[in-house]
Image (cartoon, grey):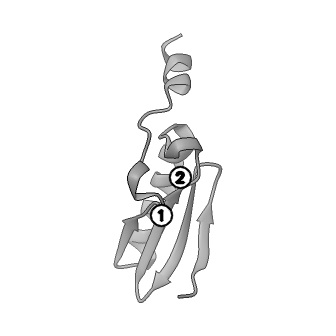
Amino acid sequence: IKTTLIYENEGVSLVHYQDDIAVLKFKTKANAIGQSVIDGLHAALDIVEARFQGMVIHQDDAQNFSGGADLKAVLRLIE
């Protein structure tokens, strides 16, 4: 199935999959959730609300959906 890139930043990519469904994928190491993923998710939600019926968050590696929070980024926030 052909997809079309809708949005991308350092942390995520959002593609139009088929019908009115968008698919979001994390692009970070171990699919960790850091600021770029959070910013990308906010932007993707704005796009999806305006243009699509729904969004699926999908990772190619089912064993490693997400490594959790980017602890280095969290540490920088604490300091």
- Point 44% across, 33% down: residue: 69
- What residue does disc 2 label? 40
Mark 1 or 2: in front is 1
- Point 48% across, 81% down: residue: 17
Give SS at disc 1. Answer: strand
Which class describes the residues within 10 Å of circle 2: few (<14), some (14-19), or many (20+)? Answer: many
Q: Amino acid at mark 1?
A: Leu
Marks 1 & 2, CB-CB < 8 Å contact: yes
Image quarter of the C terminus: top right
In the rendered image, the residue lying farthest to the top is 79
Q: Position of residue 32 (x, y in %)?
A: 49, 40
Q: Earlier in the sequence, mark 1 or mark 2?
A: 1
Q: Position of residue 78 (x, y in %)?
A: 48, 14
Q: Give the left or right position of residue 30, taking residue 65 as reference.
A: right
- Point 57% across, 82% down: residue: 3
Residue 31 to residue 57: above or below: above
* Label drawn at residue 24: 1
Residue 65 shows up from this direction:
no
- Point 58% across, 52% down: residue: 27
- Say which of 68 and 10 sits in front: 68
**How far apart are labels 1 and 2 at the CA level?**
9 Å
